[in-house]
Image (tube, rainbow, N blue to C red):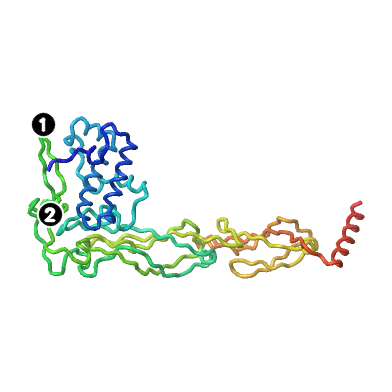
């Protein structure tokens, strides 16, 4: 079947700008999303392949120039339409904000190359996935254990990840004779060209499954919300990444599982501020306490501590409670400090007796200063 003109596929003029081509691709991608074509998903996938191929060529100035000069015989020489051929289309698709477990790009990239009924796929490692976890500052200081519910792809329980019905056999692909590739010979005024492409019947494996699994439709994997137990070590901070090997998406066709990355985000604390391993807080002292000296109680991540304020302490003075901050992820580095910033608590209401005593103090202070 002859290929359709790429400009016609995207519905743009031959002098269309890069922005117009990208806009057209965006619209086509929306129209062909499987959620909009539940009754004809296979046709939508095939149409999207053509749209993605057209965009891959027309969005690349060099390929577009070759196409404009030689037609399909130009860009076809370097276009095998495998997974990597969707790179530019994928970037544009993600740029426009499309996505989700059920998007077309999950079909093409997250779960391997698109396969028709009975096609097998090569064993591949599962994708690594990321989970954002919000914890309190107290949990970051002390460490914690918790159980998470993580959406991921797991091996199909019916076919054990093979993608075929139990007892179903596998036979050599009749289209490519088991080679997994097909040669296409093309004649042009430049000469004869041979283009080797992946067999569309078997997906490049060279084998066909007699009966694909009805549960997973031959993918070998299913979406599932899994319980995962993790230990968050003391000392983590926002942006810290915890790696759980083999806890990501299951591998394809028996391949190993990917990893699960837990990305930490610390919930802001109402009283404490973190700076590295140090914790900062404000400690209110009365004027008499600051002037005469006193002992005050300070709340820390490790409980209450007593702080001795010397006589004459000024507002903004900092006091360090050693080792009462955040522990380092490297045990040999110890803990940070709790830094108490002294503020002077000025009363808003005074009794007549307090006013009189304060006025007497001012007179005595002014007399001593004069």
Within 10 Å of the Cα at label 1, are there few (<14), some (14-19), or many (20+) other Cα atoms?
A: few
Q: Which residue is mark 1?
A: 191
Q: Residue at x 32, y 34 (%)?
A: 17
Q: Quadrant of residue 353?
A: bottom right
Within 10 Å of the Cα at label 2, are there few (<14), some (14-19), or many (20+) other Cα atoms?
A: many
Calculate the distance from the C-alpha at mark 2 to the C-alpha at mark 1: 30 Å
**Residue 92 appears at what percent x and percent y?**
33, 44
Query: Cβ–Cβ below 8 Å for labels 2 and 1?
Result: no
**Residue 277 appears at what percent x and percent y?**
56, 58
Left or right of residue 217: residue 182 = left
**Residue 368 appears at what percent x and percent y?**
91, 55
Left or right of residue 267: residue 209 = left
Q: Quadrant of the N terminus?
A: top left
In primary-sequence order, the first of circles 2 and 1 is: 1
Q: Label for residue 30?
A: none
Left or right of residue 96: residue 238 = right
Under circle 1, the secondary element is: strand
- Which one is in front, 62 or 319? 62
Q: How many marks?
A: 2
**Residue 115 appears at what percent x and percent y?**
19, 55
Q: Residue at x 55, y 60 (%)?
A: 268
Q: Quadrant of residue 61?
A: top left
- Which one is in front, 113 or 282? 113
Q: Quadrant of residue 361?
A: bottom right
- Say if 188 sits above or below 321 in the image: above
Under circle 2, the secondary element is: loop
Q: Which residue is mark 2?
A: 206
């Amino acid at each position: 079947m002859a290929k359709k003109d790429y400009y016609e596929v995207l519905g743009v003029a031959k002098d269309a700008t890069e922005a117009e081509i990208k806009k057209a691709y965006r619209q086509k991608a929306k129209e062909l999303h499987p959620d909009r074509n539940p009754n004809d998903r296979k046709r939508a996938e095939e149409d999207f392949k053509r749209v993605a191929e057209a965009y891959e060529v027309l969005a690349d100035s060099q390929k577009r120039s070759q196409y404009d000069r030689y037609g399909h015989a130009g860009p076809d020489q370097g276009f095998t339409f495998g997974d990597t051929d969707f790179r530019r289309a994928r970037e544009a698709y993600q740029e426009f904000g499309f996505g989700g477990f059920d998007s077309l790009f999950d079909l093409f990239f997250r779960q391997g190359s698109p396969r028709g009924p009975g096609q097998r796929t090569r064993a591949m490692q599962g994708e690594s996935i990321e989970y954002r976890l919000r914890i309190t500052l107290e949990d970051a200081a002390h460490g914690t254990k918790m159980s998470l519910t993580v959406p991921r792809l797991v091996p199909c329980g019916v076919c054990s990840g093979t993608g075929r019905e139990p007892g179903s056999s596998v036979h050599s692909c009749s289209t490519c004779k088991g080679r997994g590739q097909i040669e296409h010979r093309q004649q042009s005024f430049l000469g004869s060209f041979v283009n080797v492409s992946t067999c569309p019947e078997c997906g490049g494996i060279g084998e066909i499954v007699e009966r694909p699994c009805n549960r997973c439709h031959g993918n070998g994997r299913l979406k599932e919300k899994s319980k995962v137990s993790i230990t968050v070590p003391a000392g983590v901070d926002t942006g810290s990444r915890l790696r759980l090997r083999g806890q990501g998406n299951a591998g394809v066709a028996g391949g190993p599982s990917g990893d699960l990355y837990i990305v930490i985000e610390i919930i802001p604390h109402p009283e404490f501020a973190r700076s590295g391993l140090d914790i900062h807080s404000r400690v209110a002292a009365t004027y008499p306490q600051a002037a005469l000296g006193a002992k005050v109680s300070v709340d820390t991540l490790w409980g209450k501590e007593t702080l001795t304020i010397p006589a004459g302490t000024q507002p903004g003075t900092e006091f360090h409670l050693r080792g009462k901050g955040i522990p380092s992820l490297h045990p040999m580095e110890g803990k940070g400090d709790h830094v108490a910033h002294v503020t002077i608590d000025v009363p808003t209401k005074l009794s007549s007796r307090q006013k009189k005593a304060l006025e007497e103090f001012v007179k005595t202070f002014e007399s001593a200063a004069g």
